[in-house]
Every structure is written in C-alpha cells, then in structure tokens.
Image (spheres, helix red, strand yellow):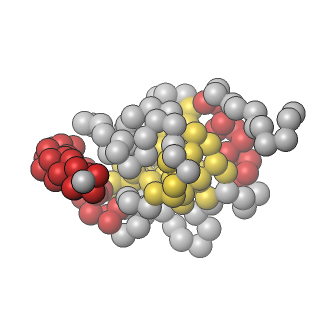
Amino acid sequence: MEPGRHDVITDNEAVAGLLTEALRAGHSFSFRAGGFSMSPFIKDGDLITISPFGNMPPGRGDIAAFLDASRKGLTVHRIIKKQGIDFIMKGDNTGVADMPVGESNLLGRVTGIRRRKKERYLGLGPEGRLLAAFSRAGILMPLMRLTRLLLLPLIITIKKCQKS
C-alpha cells in the first residue's frame, strides 16, 4: 500500500466485525458514516470515531454504535430512552425509533466527528440529552427545519456583509 493511503472497507458487516474487535481490545475505531439518519449532526461521509464505553455506562443522549438485528449490521443512532434492560435508539433524522437494543449489542459511543478536516462536537456533549428528549417527543426534526428556515437568511446576510 502507498504511504498515506488507506484501504476503504464498505461492507457493513466487515466494519462491524473490525469495530467490535477494536473496542473489545480497548481501542477507538474510526470509519466513514454512510447514510442520512443522523443528519445534521452526523452526515454521509463524515469520519466518526467510536470509543469503548469504559467506566461511563451508555446513557440517554449518547450517540452509540450497535448491532442491529433487523438490518443485519452496524447502526449508529442516538439513545433516546432506557426501557428496562434495553435501550431505545433513534436516528436524529428519522421519524420512528429502532427496535429495543440490549446492552450486549451496544458496541461503543461516538466520541468524534470529522467533516471537511474540522472536528465537530455539536450533539456529543450534554446537549445530547436535550436532543434525545426532543427526538423522543417527535419534535426534533420539525425544530431542525424551523431553525434552518430562520437561520439561513441570517447566515446569507452575514456572508454578504463579510464579502463587502
């Protein structure tokens, strides 16, 4: 392999296997996200880093990687609720929650998001709990759309002022 080049693994099951082994050994694992279910916090093509849960158990608001039996592979969604011994997961950009996920199927939490050579942190901190509450109530997607509608004209105006 050429210096600076990396093999790209696109098979979901292969990534799940490598991720599982890395996390069991106590290492973090990075890969490119595919899909739009976590947009705008994680976008298609973002480089995401998953780390072991360690001494901090999974909790509401965490974005976690898990083995999804219904999709037969790896999924990365936000924990919106704990239900008994299971966790209810949901993509920030989806209308319905996933099937309950047992703790043994949770692999690790997202600890890094890199987009266009910049680190992104929004949605990974304490605000994740608020996002989980909005998602559980079914208002996260409408709030994101409203925010975009209100902020987009402001951003365009600021950029125009910066150019002049």
Q: At x 30% / y 37%, what residue is drawn?
A: 94
Q: Nearer the viewer, residue 99 or 46?
A: 46
Compared across the picture, whether 19 is left or right of 133 comes to right
| Residue 104 in the image, given as x and y percentages of width and height | 57, 51
> Which of the 4 quarters of the picture holds residue 59?
bottom left
The quarter of the image holding the C terminus is bottom left
Pick the quarter of the image with the N terminus: top right
Q: Residue at x 37, y 37 (%)?
A: 37
Q: Does residue 103 appear in the picture of this structure?
A: no
- Can residue 148 be seen here? yes
Image coords of residue 30 (percent x, y) = 64, 48
Q: Nearer the viewer, residue 95 or 104?
A: 95
Say which quarter of the image contains residue 93.
top left
Q: Depth check: 14 or 87 in front?
A: 14
The total number of labels drawn is: 0
- Residue occupying image coordinates x 79% and y 42%: 4
Q: Residue 81: x and y, percent?
A: 33, 56
Q: Nearer the viewer, residue 135 or 71?
A: 135
Q: Residue at point 27% right, 57% down?
A: 162
* Residue found farthest to the front: 164
Instruction: Report the side of 124 relative to 23 (left or right).
Output: left
Residue 113 to residue 17: above or below: below
